[in-house]
Amino acid sequence: MEYNTVEILLIEDNMNDAELAIRAFRKGNISNNLIHLKDGAQALEFLFGTGKFEGRDTSIKPKVILLDLKMPKMDGLEVLTHIKANKLTKAIPVVVLTSSKEHPDIERAYSLGANSYIVKPVEFDEFTKIVADLGFYWLLKNQPPV
């Protein structure tokens, strides 16, 4: 897998949801530089160039992180805490994309620095539209800091 460029970092343990998101990005022609990681611990290793990703050029940052909350090893809120607490990663937009509609999760995610919180729709077409819209907005419309 090529790690020299990354635009979208998808952190999702549910392979069905991950595959749906990846297909939606492909359909919208915005999946060229997508990396999918299956748990929070692996995501932090990737972002900070440790463990399996030792030596990865950490100056190459994703334009957006799509983050699930309910994951093994380390949940999404813990991952978000680490991302937003580190000066190297705190400016990366993080979109929480999860099945949790729980108000404490929503409030906590925003208090930790999430840029958006989206509940995954159950309907396939709606899910693909939301994911494609996310990619379009964060990759093509949003102006990140330099």
Image (spheres, rainbow, N blue to C red):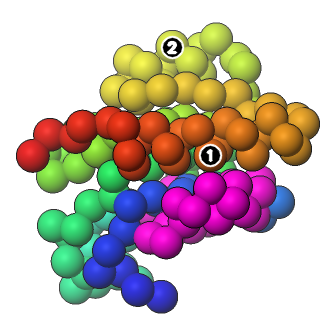
Q: Residues within 10 Å of mark 1 (few under 14, many from 20)?
A: many
Q: Residue at x 23, y 49 (%)?
A: 89
Q: Is residue 64 magenta?
A: no
- Residue at 46% across, 59% down: 9
- At 75% from the left and 46% from the top, the residue drawn is 128
Give the quadrant of residue 120.
top right
Q: Position of residue 30 (x, y in %)?
A: 52, 60
Estimate how packed mark 2 is, as few (under 14), some (14 to 19) or many (20 or more) residues with alpha carbons within 10 Å.
Answer: few
Examine the rendering and report whether any part of residue 68 can be seen. no
Q: What element carries label 2?
A: helix
Front-lying residue, 29 or 134: 29
Does residue 12 appear to the left or right of 99 in the view shown? left
Measure the alpha-carbon separation of dots 2 and 1: 25 Å
Q: Position of residue 49 (x, y in %)?
A: 27, 74
The span picked out in magenta is 17-43
Image: 101 above or below 8: above
Query: Label 1 amino acid?
Result: Ala
Residue 33 placed where, x, y %? 44, 70
In the rendered structure, the answer to whether residue 89 lies left or right of residue 30 reads: left
What residue is rendered at 34% in x and 27% in y? 113
Query: Is residue 38 one of those drawn in magenta?
Result: yes
Above-or-below relation of 25 to 125: below
Q: Name the residue under label 2.
A: 107
Q: Earlier in the sequence, mark 2 or mark 1?
A: 2
Answer left or right for 117 relative to 91. Answer: right
View extreme (right): residue:
123
Vertical order, 1 against 125 (above or below): below
Judging by the rendered image, the residue that carries numbered circle 1 is: 132
Mark 2 residue type:
Glu
Q: How many labels does the image show?
A: 2
Element under label 1? helix
